[in-house]
Image (spheres, helix red, strand yellow):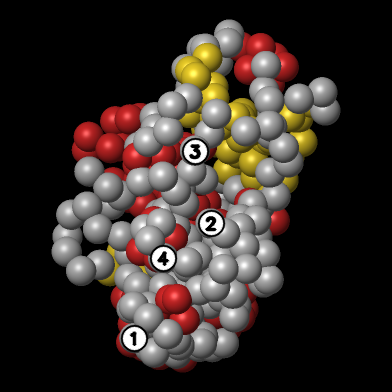
C-alpha cells in the first residue's frame, strides 16, 4: 500500500470544497482498503465521510430515503424496509458477512468494484486498471464473469447485491459535486457498460459523491424477493441472483419487476420478461414461459456458459416463490 493523507472535513460542504483530483472518499472502507493494499488503486488523500450527515433512513412522501452512510446492517434491519421493500433487506442479508455489513455502507456498496481476479491482481493486464492493456478474462478464467453487457474489452461483472434490488425498484440517486449542487439520477443511468472504455464504470463526475438513495413504494415493492445462487452459502458472490417484485390482484399480474446480479457488467434489468408477465395469470405455466426468456441476449465466454440456463432457473424459482 502506498502512503496517503487522511483528512476529516465536517459536513457535505466541507467535504466537497476540500476535494482535489487524486482524492478518494472513504466510508466503511471494506472494499477500498482491500484495493489499496493490493495496489489496484493508490489515492493521494482519503476524505473520511463520517462527519457528514448522511446516515439517516427515513420515509419521505411514502418513498424510502437511504443516506449514503447508512450501514448495510442498519438498512437490512429497518422495520419499514423489511415490511415495504423486503427485497432490499433480503439482498443485504445475503451479502458478505455480519462483520462487513456492520461496516459497509449503502454508497460504498453501490460503488463496489468488480471481483474479477484479473482486475484485482496487478500481475495481470486489465483494461479497467490500465486502459488498452487487454482483457485476459476473455480467454482465461471467466467462469464467474458476465454474460450480459460485456464487450471485447471487458466481461467483468458488477459484484454487489443491493444495486440489483434497487434496479428492480427503479431507485434514484442523489449526487453532489463541488460547486454544482445536487442532481438526481435514475440508478439505471448511473452505471456504464464497458464498451471500449471499461475503466469508466459510473456517471459520477470529478469530485461527485452519492448522498442519498430514493426508492419509490408500490405493491410490487411490498411483494418482492431476492434469490441468490452461489458456490457456498456464506460470504460468497452471486453466480446468478434475481430481484423480483410482483403486483398481483384477482390472480392477475398487474406489474412485474425483475433484475439480475452476478451475470451483467451492471445490475441487469429484464424488461422483456417483465412484459411477458404483465396482464397474465399468476400461474406456473406463465412463469415458465416468461423465465425461459431470461437468458435472451446472453453471450458466453466459455466457462460461464452454465450461467445462461442457471439464469432461467433462478428467475423461475424467484417468480414461483414470490407468488406463493
User: Which-is-in-front pick, marks 1 and 4?
Assistant: 4
Q: Position of residue 315 (x, y in %)?
A: 40, 76
Front of the two marks 1 and 2: 2
SS for dot 3: loop
Question: Is label 2 in a helix, a strand or a loop?
Answer: loop
List the single residue furthest toward the right: 180
Q: Which numbered marker is on residue 42? A: 3
Please give the count of numbered marks on the rendered protein.
4
Name the spot of residue 182 as percent of width and height, x first: 76, 30
Q: CA distance from mark 3 to mark 2?
A: 11 Å
Quarter of the C terminus within the rendering: bottom left
**Which mark is first along the chain, 4 or 1?**
4
Q: Which of the labelled discs sits on residue 124, or is there none?
A: 4
Left or right of residue 247: residue 121: left
Q: Is mark 3 in CB contact (under 8 Å) with mark 2?
A: no
Q: Is residue 318 visible?
A: no
Which of the two discs, 3 and 2, labels the residue nearer the N terminus? 3
Q: CA distance from mark 4 to mark 3?
A: 17 Å
Q: Position of residue 226 (x, y in %)?
A: 36, 59
Q: Secondary structure at mark 1?
A: loop
User: Real-space Cα distance between discs 4 and 2?
Assistant: 10 Å
SS at mark 4 in the image = loop
Between tags 4 and 2, which lies in front? 4
- Above or below, comparing residue 267 to residue 214 in the picture: below
Tell me which label, 1 or 3, sits earlier in the chain.
3
- Of pointers 4 and 3, the one earlier in the residue sequence: 3
Q: Which residue is mark 1?
A: 303
Using residue 127 as the reference point, say whether residue 39 is left or right of it. Answer: left
- According to the image, label 2 marks what residue? 129
Q: Is residue 202 visible?
A: yes
| Cβ–Cβ under 8 Å for marks 4 and 3 | no
Amino acid at each position: 500500500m502506498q502512503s496517503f493523507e487522511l483528512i476529516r472535513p465536517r459536513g457535505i460542504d466541507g467535504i466537497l470544497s476540500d476535494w482535489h483530483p487524486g482524492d478518494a472518499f472513504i466510508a466503511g472502507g471494506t472494499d477500498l482498503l482491500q484495493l489499496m493494499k493490493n495496489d489496484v488503486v493508490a489515492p493521494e488523500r482519503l476524505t473520511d465521510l463520517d462527519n457528514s450527515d448522511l446516515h439517516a433512513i427515513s420515509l419521505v412522501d411514502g418513498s424510502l430515503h437511504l443516506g449514503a452512510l447508512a450501514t448495510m446492517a442498519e438498512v437490512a434491519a429497518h422495520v419499514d424496509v423489511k415490511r415495504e421493500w423486503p427485497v432490499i433487506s433480503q439482498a443485504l442479508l445475503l451479502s458478505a458477512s455480519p462483520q462487513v455489513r456492520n461496516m459497509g455502507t449503502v454508497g460504498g456498496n453501490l460503488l463496489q468494484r468488480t471481483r474479477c481476479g484479473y482486475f484485482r491482481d496487478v500481475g495481470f493486464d486489465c483494461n479497467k486498471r490500465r486502459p488498452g492493456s487487454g482483457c485476459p478474462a476473455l480467454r482465461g478464467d471467466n467462469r464467474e464473469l458476465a454474460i450480459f453487457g460485456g464487450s471485447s474489452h471487458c466481461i467483468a461483472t458488477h459484484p454487489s447485491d443491493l444495486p440489483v434490488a434497487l434496479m428492480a425498484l427503479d431507485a434514484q440517486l442523489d449526487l453532489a459535486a463541488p460547486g454544482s449542487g445536487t442532481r438526481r439520477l435514475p440508478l439505471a443511468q448511473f452505471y456504464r457498460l464497458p464498451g471500449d472504455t471499461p475503466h469508466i464504470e459510473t456517471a459520477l463526475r470529478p469530485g461527485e459523491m452519492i448522498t442519498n438513495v430514493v426508492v419509490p413504494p408500490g405493491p410490487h415493492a411490498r411483494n418482492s424477493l431476492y434469490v441468490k445462487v452461489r458456490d457456498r452459502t456464506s460470504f460468497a458472490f452471486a453466480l446468478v441472483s434475481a430481484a423480483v417484485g410482483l403486483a398481483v390482484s384477482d390472480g392477475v399480474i398487474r406489474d412485474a419487476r425483475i433484475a439480475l446480479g452476478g451475470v451483467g457488467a451492471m445490475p441487469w434489468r429484464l424488461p422483456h420478461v417483465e412484459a411477458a408477465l404483465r396482464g397474465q395469470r399468476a400461474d406456473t405455466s406463465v412463469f415458465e414461459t416468461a423465465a425461459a426468456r431470461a437468458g435472451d441476449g446472453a453471450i458466453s465466454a466459455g466457462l460461464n456458459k452454465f450461467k445462461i440456463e442457471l439464469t432461467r432457473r433462478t428467475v423461475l424459482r424467484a417468480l414461483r416463490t414470490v407468488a406463493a
